[in-house]
Amino acid sequence: MHMLPKIMALALLAACVQAVPAAAQTTAYAAGQGSPNQIVLSIPVTASVGGRCAFATGGAPSGTYDQPNFDVIGLNHDFTFALECTGPSRVAVVSTNGGLKTAGSAPTGYSTLAPYDVTLNLVGSSATANQTCQVATLVTGSTCTFLGPASTAQGLRLASNSINQTGTYLRVSAPPYAGATQLVSGNYADTLTVTVSASP
């Protein structure tokens, strides 16, 4: 009667011991059946957290900017936004038109497309990143470093985390128009699309 519980206890313990590699063979005894009556097993546990990156709630870049007579006055406006990135990130921009564009065709000596600059300024907890590109380089196939869409390898890289940091913005700017051709009268427009990605 006394042997049956002992054999069952050893069989159960042996099943547990076999599930974990051991450096040396050890015999264990059930409680009250001799000394030692326990084995210390080391079970390593590891885990990781992947980078998470997005625009902060309520902090995505948005809005419109309307500047009458920009050919005479120029442009200068900041669109502020905030990141919520737990590690390094990349932000990228795409322009729909590659400049301020109006509908219709241009007679000789005139243009329907006006250039401007786009500046990205990113602020993290321990780093910043800043770069300016001409808007003409923010269309598919062009060469600006922060041409979008953003990916782990594409876009202006911020080398630290950024959780609701202030000071991040996208700026559009241009001096009064001084192109070789005149701009036709009309309403000019462009749309900038900003994307963000984690960048391990």
Image (cartoon, rainbow, N blue to C red):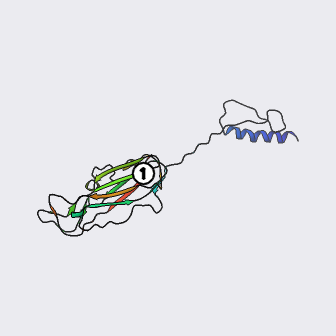
**Residue 33 image point, x, y percent:** 84, 36
- Kindly identify which residue carries mark 1: 123
Taking depth in this image into account, of 46 and 148 the one nearest to the observer is 148
The residue carrying pointer 1 sits among few (fewer than 14), some (14 to 19) or many (20 or more) residues within 10 Å by Cα, namely: many
**Residue 187 image point, x, y percent:** 24, 69
**Residue 74 image point, x, y percent:** 25, 61
Q: How many marks?
A: 1
Q: Residue furthest front?
A: 73
> Is 131 placed left or right of 29 in the picture?
left
Taking depth in this image into account, of 194 and 160 the one nearest to the observer is 160
Residue 150 can be seen in this image: no
Taking depth in this image into account, of 39 and 122 the one nearest to the observer is 122
Residue at (73, 31) in percent of width and height: 26
Q: Is residue 164 above or below residue 64?
A: above
Q: Residue furthest bottom?
A: 186
**Residue 22 image point, x, y percent:** 67, 33
Residue at (65, 39) in percent of width and height: 43
Q: Quadrant of residue 2?
A: top right
Check disc 1 and give the amino acid type. Val
> Is 84 placed left or right of 143 in the picture?
right
Residue 135 can be seen in this image: yes
> Is 3 placed left or right of 91 in the picture?
right
| Secondary structure category for the residue under label 1 | strand
Q: Quadrant of residue 55?
A: bottom left
